Structure formats: C-alpha cells, structure tokens
Image (cartoon, grey):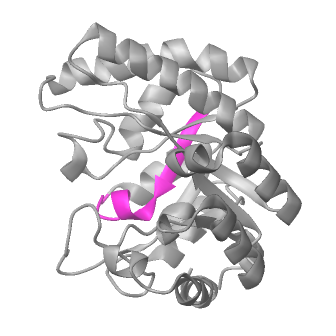
C-alpha cells in the first residue's frame, strides 16, 4: 500500500507532545515529514521549532492553522487578519508546503455573510502570502461544522473560493474525514487537479463518539482511505500524506504506541 516515505505526522495525532517530542517521535519511527500546529509552535517558540525540525532533517508538510475569518465585529475580523499574517510568517520560517486554512463560522453571522467574510479575508491575505512564498490551502470541513468552524463544506465550493487566484497560490487540503460522505467526491477530486496542496487521512468511527474528538485510526471505521489516495494521485498529488486524528483516547495513550500503529496502518491500508 502506501510508501512510508509519503507519511507525515500531523501533530494533532499526538496532541500532548511538544514540538520537540513530536519531532523526536518521527525520527524514532522513520516518519520523514511533520505538520505542526501553531499553538505548539507558540509554546516552543518559532526559532526553536525551526531548529528542532531542521536538526532532525524533517520536511514540514503544513502549518495548522490559519483562517477563522468569520466574526461578528470589524475589530474581531481585523485581529484575525493580523493573526493570519503571523501564521504566514510561521509557515515561511518553517518552509512548510502550505498554510492550512480552517476558514471559520459563527452562529452570530448568517452563512452567506460568513462566506463573504472568507472571500474578503483571502483577498487581503493572499498578496501577503505570495510575497512570503507561502501557499494557502483551503480545507473544506464536514457540514456538521458549518455553524462554528467552517462555512466551506465541499470540495466544489472550496474550488470556487480558490478560483480567483493562481493554482500555485491557493489550493485545497483534502481530508477524508470531511468529504468521504459526498457522492460527488471522486468527481470533485478530478476537478481539483492542480490545486491539491495536501491530503489527510484518518477514519470515521461508527457510531461517532464525539464530533470533534472522535476520529479513528485508519481501518477502524467507514472511510476508504486507499481509494481516495488513488484518486488524489490520479489528480496529480504525490506529496506527503498527513495522518491527522483528533481522539482523546489516543491522546491519553502512549505516544510511541500511537506512532507505531500509525506506521502500520498507513503502510497497510492507505
């Protein structure tokens, strides 16, 4: 199945680990790439995070996350724009393949207005990202998050949001957890050819134990991760494949055991 050299550890999978611990874990388990979360970068310090990654010889597949453009007040939206500029700076320093965008949502903002805020936020952010050589990856999230996390909920919709920009500036992060249910997913993946900046895998546990912290290890649920990997490769994406699992039970368990399982399931099932 999947080549281990394609594997990237998304730091969310070992949430309790620091940047240094996650980097050292990757080295122990032969994982060549890592995706870092910004709150962990802040804890370690950006310079230290860069040093940990560089000294270990790891590739940074993404920085998670920017976005959250949606807010009910102008002041809040301005603060988020400034924070997104900082996120670009961090992604540039880490030489990440892309900066992942979870675009935001709010129950206080009508969904059509929220999508306009996302469009306006991107228009302001993309020139800054271009100047710093950072690619912006829009991640469509499952519709169950449309009220509080993201008003981008399908691949097709995200492609439309990316379309005003060149294909080397704004693309998509495709996470199987978010689109596996979509009957048009394979068709939309084909349409995304040339704009796929990242590919994430995990599994959809039945029944879902928690809508935020209930993702499963590959093979423990309903998602055909291998089928989707073949589809994104047919669409031209051959970059790192991130394993991103938000799961409290995993976070409470031994991190090295988690990484050993990630490697086993990735190479057999993805």
Residue 221 x/y as whole percent: 33, 83
Q: Residue at x 30, y 60 (%)?
A: 183
Q: Is residue 170 left or right of residue 134?
A: left
Q: Is residue 21 left or right of residue 140?
A: right
Does 16 appear above or below 162? below
Counting from the top left corner in percent of width and height, residue 36 is at 60, 53
Q: Is residue 176 magenta?
A: yes
In the displayed structure image, the side of residue 85 where residue 210 appears, left or right: left
**At 45% across and 81% down in the image, what residue appears?**
218
Say which of 182 and 253 sits in front.
Answer: 253
- Residue 126 coordinates in the image, percent (x, y): 59, 19
From the viewer's perspective, is residue 165 above or below residue 170?
above
Tally of marks: 0
Q: Where, quadrant-wise, is the C terminus in this rendering?
A: bottom right
Q: Is residue 216 magenta?
A: no
Q: Is residue 175 above or below residue 263?
A: above
Residue in view at x 41 percent, y 22 percent: 80
Of residues 117 and 41, the one drawn nearer to the viewer in this rendering: 41
- The outermost residue toward the top is 74
Residue 25: x %, y % from top left: 68, 76
Residue segment shown in magenta: 169-183
Residue 234 visible? The answer is no
Image quarter in which the N terminus is found: bottom right
Q: Is residue 141 visible?
A: yes
Question: In terms of depth relative to the viewer, which is nearer, 201 or 254?
Answer: 254
């Amino acid at each position: 199945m999947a080549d281990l050299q394609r594997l990237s550890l998304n730091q969310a999978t070992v949430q309790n680990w620091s940047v240094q611990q996650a980097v050292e874990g990757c080295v122990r388990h032969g994982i060549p790439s890592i995706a870092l979360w910004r709150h962990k970068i802040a804890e370690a310090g950006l310079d230290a995070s860069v040093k940990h990654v560089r000294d270990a010889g790891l590739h940074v597949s993404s920085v998670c996350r920017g976005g959250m453009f949606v807010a009910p007040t102008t002041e809040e939206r301005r603060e988020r724009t400034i924070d997104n500029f900082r996120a670009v700076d961090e992604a540039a320093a880490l030489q990440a393949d892309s900066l992942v965008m979870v675009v935001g949502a709010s129950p206080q903002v009508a969904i059509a207005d929220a999508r306009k805020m996302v469009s306006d936020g991107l228009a302001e952010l993309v020139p800054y990202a271009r100047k710093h050589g950072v690619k912006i990856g829009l991640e469509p999230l499952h519709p169950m998050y449309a009220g509080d996390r993201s008003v981008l909920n399908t691949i097709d919709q995200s492609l439309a949001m990316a379309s005003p920009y060149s294909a080397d500036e704004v693309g998509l992060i495709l996470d199987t957890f978010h689109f596996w249910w979509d009957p048009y997913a394979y068709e939309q993946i084909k349409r995304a050819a040339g704009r796929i900046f990242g590919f994430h895998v995990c599994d959809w546990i039945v029944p879902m134990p928690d809508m935020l912290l209930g993702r499963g290890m590959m093979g423990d649920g309903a998602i055909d991760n291998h089928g989707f990997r073949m589809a994104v490769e047919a669409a031209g994406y051959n970059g790192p494949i991130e394993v991103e699992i938000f799961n409290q039970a995993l976070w409470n368990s031994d991190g090295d055991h988690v990484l050993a399982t990630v490697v086993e399931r990735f190479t057999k099932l993805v």
